[in-house]
Amino acid sequence: MLKQEINELLTQTGPGTPMGALFRQYWIPALLAEELPEDDCPPVRVKLLSERLIAFRDSEGRYGLMDEFCAHRGVSLWFGRNEESGLRCAYHGWKYDVTGQCVEIPSEPDERQSSLCAKIKLTSYPLIKIGEVLWTYMGDPKDTPDLPQWEFAQVPREQSYTSKRWQECNWLQALEGGIDSSHVSWLHSGGLKNDPLFKGARGNNYNLADRKPFFEVVESDGGLFIGVRRNAEEGHYYWRITPWVMPSFTMIPPRGDHPIHGHFWIPIDDENCWVFSYDYHPVRPLTEQERQAMEDGHGVHNEYVPGTYRPLQNKDNDYLMDREAQKRGDTYSGVRGISMQDASLQESMGPIVDRTKERLVSTDGGIIMARRKLWRAVEALRDEGVPPPGVDVAHQRVRSAAVVLPSDQSFVEGCGDALRVRPGEKHASV
Amino acid sequence: MQRQPTLLSSCSRAATAAETRYRIDAPGFTRRSSRVIALDPHAAEIVRRLEGQRWSGGHFLVFESALPGDALLRPAAGGTALLSAELQGADAVVMLASARASAEAASVIGEACAARSIMSAGLVVPGAGPVGEVVSALRPNAMVLVVLQDAGDIPEVLSALRV
């Protein structure tokens, strides 16, 4: 349960809000690199943290992310022409470079160009490519943090795959699904048996056999480690450990030798978010079958309405609910696919769930602590200017793990370095 | 597969902000009856401070000693109580423990909760030394175990659980 004012504090991320200020401390995923595939390609409208922006890639391969609307008459630059190292407004030809600087006003005399243009600059943010993701930092330039070092974006391209999808609810309720491991044994029970990117792991048997897991939540420098234990062989527990790094990065514990996957939840506005979903293997290329399964929407990925990043299964078609599949046990909820099983339920809560009315139980310990850490970090930033956890790249070098440990051992001790990035070493998984 | 047409009751309409105002505005649950039990003197100080705040009916207690098949507790407000009596009607128990907590206290309370199917949680509070041993002691006895770095989080965690 949260008080209404705290619910609002944590869910509102627009300009001038405390949580918005927190998000603006980080490099966040803005687009997939595939959205700006070549120099002078069409610009892309982007909304992030309740700001309408336009992204483009200029003739020299530089990426730009700036105010969507022309400074002249407020026309959308989405209609613009991306040419000769700038984005030109289609209305009167005003042209901007990747920093938002106006570089040409064709209607004005040549001798006045430079002085007029110098006074016109759209708000812009840096946009850089790391891995297959374009990242932006929307905070104060003087506080720009080091570039992000998430392992999924740093391994060679053939070892990683990233997708994104539009989710029609507030970012926080989507994130909370990612740190709520207890739902896996229920909602995703079908996927553990059928999904090509999940099935076959020994750990799945523990998941399916013990539906009353115990939780252990330990604070980390960047956020939390959420350990969930289920019964394994005599005298042992099966632990699944999910790192959450502030504000919205999670990594799902692995299964067997399958790639590791996880998410970034990025607010579009207060009632919508982007879910960036990644899969990677730390030591080997993804197989053709794995990559094909990801492209086909298995695992944490999804199918799309053609030509968009909207899931094919969405609330307009009731997520293609299949009651027969539900009855047969192919899926637990009747919705196909792990990501859409999550999204359908999270969207059903409404755009921003009313947390004053919930009744949390012991398995919600991770959610309770994540909210508390966000709240604490928001206040520390707002009141004292303290940079939040997760900005430091050292906090980003984490891994999830799935291990069987003796019952008297803590997962922190038992996993040791397995919860840290170890370049060239395989992840800990059963 | 046969599909039904999109109706007014479909997800596209049901999940809108406008529709949330038609949600039944009555709690789908009765008030939780919670017990917060300090397992050691350091945690007891915290419990005594918490007891003076406004809660939703939770009882704040301190573990005193084990008894055969039971335990003696001290309510933060004064007097004594038996664990067995406190657990009657309780549906959640939060054990508050620092590094000084005894494994016996965690075991007695945890087993009593398990026997009565009462939700149990353990909050390990900072400030009294390394917590490795108390975490091990609480692990088999709490359905959720949270190791805190900041004692200031305790009231918020308890509020979230509607203590």
Image (cartoon, coloured by chain):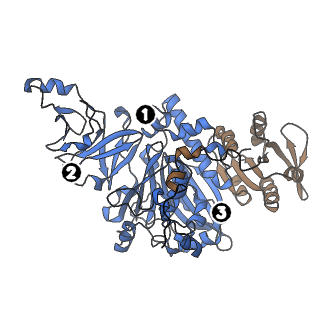
Chain colours: A blue, B brown
Residue at x 42% of width, y 58% of height: A277
Front in this rendered view, residue A127 or A121:
A121
Residue at x 87% of width, y 51% of height: B83
* Dot 3 crowding, Cα within 10 Å, few <14, some 14–19, many 20+: some
Amino acid, disc 3: Pro
Residue at x 54% of width, y 41% of height: A374
Pointer 1 and pointer 3 on the same chain: yes
Q: Is residue A410 visible?
A: yes
Mark nearer the N terminus (1 vs 2): 1
Label total for image? 3
**Residue A15 badge:** 1
Mark nearer the N terminus (1 vs 3): 1
Residue B120 higher or lower than B148, as above or below = below
Q: Where is residue B49 in the image (x, y as percent from the top left)?
A: 76, 34
The answer for which chain carries disc 2 is A
The answer for which chain carries disc 1 is A
Q: Name the residue under label 2.
A: A41
The quarter holding residue A63 reads top left
The answer for which chain carries disc 3 is A
Q: Position of residue A276 (x, y in %)?
A: 41, 54
Amino acid, disc 2: Cys
Using the numbered discs, state the Cα–Cα distance from disc 1 to disc 3 in whole angstroms. Answer: 40 Å
Secondary structure type for disc 3: loop
Q: Where is residue A408 in the image (x, y as percent from the top left)?
A: 67, 63
**Residue A213 badge:** 3
